[in-house]
Image: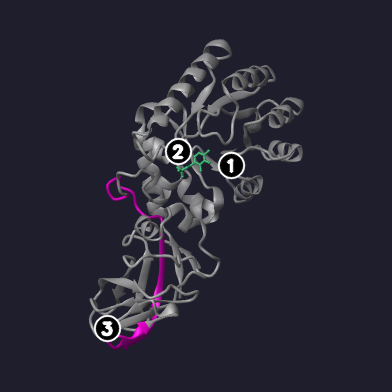
């Protein structure tokens, strides 16, 4: 059986780590893309101490409301149509406003006083060059929105926060801080700021502003290039496991799997594991990839390399390090405490975010 287990305690622990790092800020916990593959319904109970949640689409926002989330929901790309803007009002969703048409919908259709949609996240493009107004556009939009009765949160997004010394970071911080000061001075001192994703929270503690927007750090992966999840005291919120379904011994020189890519140097004990790219385990892992096998008999665990091509439904592992008594049915951890999903992502030439988001519907899902 392939199983994805979501660990509530780990989520809460990681949220507390964020709160300790950003004690003055409110937390918008990012749960877009089905909570980075963890499942929104599975993570919301553990995130009750967040001040709000962030999603990327209206559908995701409505799903969270349906699940009973009553606090702030921030729609980080805003409404895509005037009709979506109306639905956002109907369901008390706070929207990012990042371009002219969204600004016009907001000015033509102002939600009632007290509505959560009256809080607008005004997006300033400080250098990422995807969403947002330039400095002049932000100023003029802020004036009009403030006059129409909106409370404003100036927001921007880092392009390189994972790399502390990247020169664009200082530039984005400088632009953001300068425009926020201008808005406070010329429009209202109540205008708030939101700058940091997970990497920004770790790397730029002096620039947390009113709202931080942690994503990957909540799920227990490292957001920065120079510190591991362990070093940051993060706990993996997901354990992805499967089991041994057959045991074999291959003779020296025999090859395993599609393309006969892996060839045994000597007689080698191998095991088949019931997981593959059809579940979301990456096909492209390099020869450094390994899994952890738990031996139910002696409650030990063994580090076993993945050998041969990853197929749709199975992988083969080298169990030379495990005892002969290792049984069919033994549990195999693909990622969790060891290896961490960050390591697997490294072996697959990608980032943890992608591996987590692209898990398929085949694995069973449980919570612990
Ligand atoms: C996804 C997202 C985040 C969270 O990013 P992480 O790198 O996962 O922390 C923060 N802000 C915005 C606008 C996002 O879209």
Left or right, 54 with reference to 250:
right
| Image-quadrant location for residue 25 | top left
Residue 197 bears which disc, if any? 2
Disc 2 within 8 angstroms of ligand 1 (CB): yes
Q: Residues within 10 Å of mark 1 (few under 14, many from 20)?
A: few
Residue at mark 1: 70
Name the spot of residue 2 as percent of width and height, x first.
46, 72
Q: Going from the N terminus, do you reach mark 1 or mark 2 first? A: 1
> Which label sits in the foreground, 1 or 2?
2
Residue at x 26% of width, y 81% of height = 265
Name the spot of residue 332 as percent of width and height, x first.
36, 72
Q: Residues within 10 Å of mark 2 (few under 14, many from 20)?
A: many
Which secondary structure lies at badge 1?
loop
Q: Extreme top residue here?
A: 186
Q: Going from the N terminus, do you reach mark 2 or mark 3 first? A: 2
Residue 52 to residue 293: above or below: above
Name the spot of residue 301 as percent of width and height, x first.
26, 71
**Front in this rendered view, residue 175 or 84:** 175
Which secondary structure lies at badge 3?
strand
Distance, label 1 to label 2, CA atoms, is 23 Å
Residue at mark 3: 268
| Image-quadrant location for residue 360 | bottom right
Q: Which residues are magenta?
A: 229-255
| Image-quadrant location for residue 117 | top right
Residue 353 to residue 294: above or below: above
């Amino acid at each position: 059986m392939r199983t994805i287990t979501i660990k509530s305690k780990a989520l809460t622990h990681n949220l507390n780590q964020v709160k300790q790092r950003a004690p003055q800020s409110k937390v918008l916990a990012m749960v877009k893309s089905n909570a980075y593959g963890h499942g929104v319904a599975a993570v919301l109970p553990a995130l009750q101490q967040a001040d709000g949640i962030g999603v990327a689409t209206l559908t995701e926002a409505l799903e969270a409301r349906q699940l009973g989330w009553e606090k702030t929901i921030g729609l980080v790309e805003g409404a895509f149509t005037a009709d979506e803007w109306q639905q956002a009002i109907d369901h008390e969703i706070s929207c990012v406003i990042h371009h002219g048409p969204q600004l016009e919908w907001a000015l033509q259709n102002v939600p009632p006083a007290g509505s959560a949609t009256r809080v607008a996240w005004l997006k300033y493009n400080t250098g990422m060059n995807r969403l947002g107004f330039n400095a002049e556009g932000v100023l003029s939009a802020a004036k009009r929105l403030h006059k129409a009765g909106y409370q404003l949160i100036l927001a921007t997004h880092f392009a390189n926060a994972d790399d502390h010394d990247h020169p664009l970071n200082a530039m984005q911080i400088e632009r953001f801080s300068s425009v926020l000061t201008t808005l406070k001075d010329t429009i209202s001192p109540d205008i708030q700021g939101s700058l940091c994703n997970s990497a920004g929270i770790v790397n730029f503690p002096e620039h947390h502003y009113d709202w931080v927007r942690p994503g990957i750090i909540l799920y227990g992966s490292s957001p920065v290039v120079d510190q591991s999840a362990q070093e940051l005291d993060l706990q993996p919120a997901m354990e992805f496991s499967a089991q041994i379904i057959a045991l074999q011994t291959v003779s020296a020189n025999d090859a395993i799997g599609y393309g006969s890519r892996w060839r045994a140097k000597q007689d080698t004990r191998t095991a088949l594991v019931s997981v593959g790219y059809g579940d979301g385990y990456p096909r492209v892992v390099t020869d450094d990839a390994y899994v952890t096998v738990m031996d139910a008999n002696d409650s030990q665990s063994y580090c076993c390399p993945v050998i041969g091509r990853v197929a749709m439904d199975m992988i083969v592992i080298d169990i030379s390090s495990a005892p002969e008594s290792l049984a069919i049915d033994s549990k195999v951890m693909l990622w969790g405490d060891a290896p961490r999903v960050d390591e697997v992502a490294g072996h697959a030439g990608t980032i943890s975010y992608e591996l987590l988001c692209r898990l398929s519907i085949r694995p069973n899902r449980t919570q612990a």
